[in-house]
Image: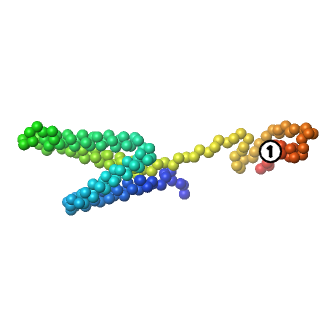
C-alpha cells in the first residue's frame, strides 16, 4: 500500500467540519420550523465555522485563499448594499415615499449576493479542510568515496603511512588504513 501524499487533518480542520455540519443542520431546521432560537444557534454555528476556517487557513499559511475569501466577502457586501439601495430601503431621502422600482430590477443584485456568499463559504471550507501535501524529505547527497548499499565499492588509493621509526606501535595502529576491497 502506498502512503498517502496528504497529512491527516488538523484539529482546526476537524472543528471546521463539525461547525459546518452544525450550521447546515441548524439552518435546515430553522427553514423547516421558523423558530428564532434555532436561527440564533445556526448563526452561532456559522460564526464558529468562519472562525475555525480562518484559524485553519492562517495556520497552514494559505494567504491566497484568505485573500480570495476576502474578495468574495467584499463582493457579497457590495451586492447586498446595491440590492437594498435599488429597493429603496437604504439611503433614501424620503422614507415615506413608495418606490417605483420593481423587484425584477433588484433580482440580479440579490442573486449576486447569494452567489458571492456561497463562493465565500466554499472557499473557506475548501481552504480549511483540504489537507496539506506531505513534504518530501531530501536524501543527503552521496559523499565522495562512499558507495550506495548493494553496489561494490571502489578501492581508494592508499594513503601514505608514516614509516618513521619514532612512532610507537600504538600510534601506527590508530593511523588510518586504506579501505579493503570487497568482492561482491
Residue 171 vertical placement versus 11 (above, below): above
Q: Nearer the viewer, residue 74 or 183?
A: 74
The percent coordinates of residue 34 (x first, y second) are 20, 60
Q: Residues within 10 Å of mark 1 (few under 14, many from 20)?
A: some
Q: Looking at the rendering, which quadrant does residue 175 occupy?
A: top right
Image coordinates of residue 31 in percent, x first then y, are 22, 58
Q: Which residue is labeled 1 in the image?
A: 179
Q: Determine the residue positioned at 15% across, 39% down.
A: 91
For the residue pair 97 and 119, the one nearer the viewer reads as 97
Q: Mark 1: which secondary structure?
A: loop
Q: x, y percentage for residue 92? A: 12, 39
> Which residue is located at x 31 percent, y 42 percent?
72
Residue 45 at x, y percent in the picture: 31, 56
Residue closest to the eye, 72 or 108 = 72
User: Of all residues shown, which one is farthest toward the right?
Assistant: 165
* Image quadrant where one finds the N terminus: bottom right
Residue 127 in the image: above or below residue 30: above
Instruction: From the viewer's perspective, tell me whether residue 92 is left or right of residue 178.
Output: left
Seen in the picture, residue 93 relative to 45 is either above or below; the reply is above
- The single residue placed furthest to the left in the displayed view is 97
Q: Residue at x 77, y 42 (%)?
A: 154
128 left or right of 175 in image: left
Amino acid at each position: 500500500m502506498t502512503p498517502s501524499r496528504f497529512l491527516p487533518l488538523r484539529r482546526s480542520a476537524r472543528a471546521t467540519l463539525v461547525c459546518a455540519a452544525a450550521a447546515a443542520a441548524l439552518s435546515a431546521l430553522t427553514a423547516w420550523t421558523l423558530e428564532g432560537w434555532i436561527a440564533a444557534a445556526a448563526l452561532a454555528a456559522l460564526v464558529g465555522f468562519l472562525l475555525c476556517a480562518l484559524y485553519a487557513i492562517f495556520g497552514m499559511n494559505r494567504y491566497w485563499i484568505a485573500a480570495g475569501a476576502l474578495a468574495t466577502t467584499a463582493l457579497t457586501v457590495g451586492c447586498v448594499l446595491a440590492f437594498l439601495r435599488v429597493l429603496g430601503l437604504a439611503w433614501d431621502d424620503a422614507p415615506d415615499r413608495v418606490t417605483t422600482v420593481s423587484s425584477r430590477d433588484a433580482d440580479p443584485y440579490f442573486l449576486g449576493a447569494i452567489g458571492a456568499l456561497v463562493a465565500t463559504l466554499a472557499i473557506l471550507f475548501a481552504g480549511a479542510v483540504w489537507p496539506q501535501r506531505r513534504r518530501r524529505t531530501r536524501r543527503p547527497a552521496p559523499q565522495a568515496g562512499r558507495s550506495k548499499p548493494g553496489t561494490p565499492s571502489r578501492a581508494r588509493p592508499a594513503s601514505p603511512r608514516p614509516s618513521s621509526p619514532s612512532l610507537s606501535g600504538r600510534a601506527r595502529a590508530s593511523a588510518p588504513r586504506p579501505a579493503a576491497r570487497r568482492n561482491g
